[in-house]
Image (cartoon, grey):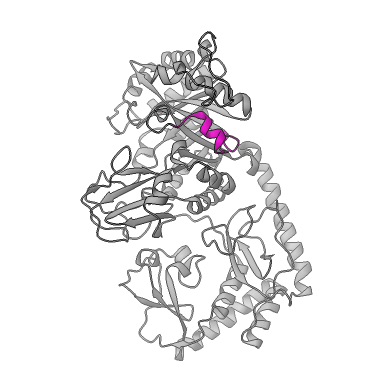
Amino acid sequence: MKKPAVRNSWHSLLTLVFLTFSGAASAYDCTNLPEYQDGMTLPADGKVQAIGNAYQCDVNGWCSLGGAYAPGTGWAWQYAWTDLGVCDGTSSSSSSSSSSSSSSSSSSSSSSSSSSSTSSSSSGGELPACPSQSWQQGSVYTGNSDPVFVPPDWMCTAKWWTQGEPNPNDPWGAWECVKCNPSSSSSSSSSSSSSSSSSSSSSSSSSSSSSSSSSGGTGGKLLAGYFTEWGIYDRNYHPKNLVTSGSAEKLTHIVFAFGNVTNGQCVLGDSYADYDRFYSAAESVDGTSDDWNSTEVRGLFGQFKKLKAMYPHLKIVWSFGGWTWSGGFGQAAANATAFADQCYGLVNDPRWAGVFDGIDIDWEYPNECGLTCDTSGFDSYRVLMQALRARFGNQLVTSAIGAGESKLLAADYGGAAQYLDFYMIMTYDFFGAWAKNGPTAPHSPLNDWAGMPIQGFSTDHGIDTLLSLGVPANKVLLGIGFYGRGWTGVTQAAPGGTATGAAAGTYEAGIEDYKVLKGSCPITGQIAGTNYAYCGNNWWSYDDPATIRAKMQYANGRGLGGAFFWETNGDTANGELISAMKSGL
């Protein structure tokens, strides 16, 4: 599993400092404790020794992962382990020697490190000197940058590429922070740290600027969201909600779902919702009602047209297919040129000219099974995309694709990438109550975890697989679900429990909007970079603003082009999830 964090000698120093001053001063008999190894199986409350300290496992699944959760060294280890103290006897001596070696190594790489280390060991309790270089808004930091000072008393080091502000209380973010002494900064480290940080920042900034030309840069990250045709009915969600929530100004793209695909053609999904429904002044995005006597398009298309007039930066693409309406793509691919011609005519129909900026293809799934199974072959998807690009020219051609490895390998997504503006990889719905008896598992995990029902069903693995096919990272948008999936009849809070079926949902069993779940079943735990919630005998998993921001940092760290979500009406009235995505990117 690839990790975005890149560590340097400063990380070694920070780890040493943290271990020295974390308050775990008491000795512990480590005689019978095994040395920690990534992936090792531990019993409940299992104990290990690592880098001269004893640790007790608090969260079994995380303890076995290593990396970020490796005791004493991983940036999130405190969430999986309890530090029992320094090993006594032989282990303590070994630890001391190891620490001395580490200190010496850190010292040779930086005079500032030497100063901090010496100060710490001689005083036996003082905090290290704070870096002379403060965090600078707008600067680029990477895993190779020196630590920065964050008032009032924090020393923070970037874990991966970021321009975000350090938050010492956010272990999932892009920064690792430890306490420092702001009154004892070293002058010798000033020029070294300043020069190194400035050089690193300048180099990173230059590199970022160079690669930004194709991806839009940090300020040019894409933020796309699905708007569903049927949302105007039971959910009573309309384009004006994007305005009142403050979301329209944050989005770069709206993906309108869905048009149907049948008989080798693109077809309207719901003509009444699309261009016939009358919008009153109170419902309309601009406060002006539709006019029955006007030739101007009504319905959602009319509202989208007004929305684009208010927010000229917005692009809107019309998505065809989806889970229910993907059965016709195989036939369409058999005569891709004819399909592309007909779809172009529908998307750019004179009645709603200027509403759409292109087409999105949500084929679930080429040469694989979704609601129906497709047998059109490995090349059919690429052939279809090539025909669409040829017909749509400079208009947008985008596509939502699955995130499971088998689906990504079933079609030529690598070969098709040249014809698309971007892919939206659906990194959600990995697990759910279609397995009615469980085991319970988060539907949108960021990474794999020990004991997961299907290894590799995670965001990180999906991204790894897609990029391995030669798809440019800046053409990939990370997927976020604005909803949760859940089971009922569950008797344990932790993931991996049994169930009796799908939990009740407002519109469909086993699924519920975030805006409902945040109040009806609050979060009780985290696993694999997402949340779960246990209430009564129901078990749900869903993302919230905190995990979404962390996923955006992950997307930035992987060099992705941005992120997208399914779908707008799952958010709160003030658009808190869209705001989290925007701030994270």
Residue 572 showing in the rendered view: yes
Residue 232 position within the rendered picture, expressed as x and y whole percent measured from the top left:
42, 28
Position above or below: 379 against 215: above
Total number of numbered labels?
Answer: 0
- Please state which of residues 371 and 282 is positioned toward the viewer in this rendering: 282
Q: Residue at x 68, y 78 (%)?
A: 116
Residue 202 position within the rendered picture, expressed as x and y whole percent measured from the top left:
73, 53
* Magenta stretch: helix, strand or loop mostly: loop
- Please state which of residues 253 and 193 is positioned toward the viewer in this rendering: 253
Residue 542 showing in the rendered view: no
Residue 46 position within the rendered picture, expressed as x and y whole percent measured from the top left:
34, 75
Q: Is residue 238 magenta?
A: yes
Q: Which residues, given as a range, are shown in magenta?
A: 237-252
- Please state which of residues 125 and 470 is positioned toward the viewer in this rendering: 125
Q: Quadrant of the N terminus?
A: bottom left
Q: Is residue 216 magenta?
A: no
Residue 52 position within the rendered picture, expressed as x and y whole percent measured from the top left:
48, 81
Position above or below: 333 against 93: above
The answer to which image quadrant residue 411 occupies is top left
Position above or below: 557 against 386: below
Position above or below: 455 against 64: above
Q: Residue at x 72, y 61 (%)?
A: 197
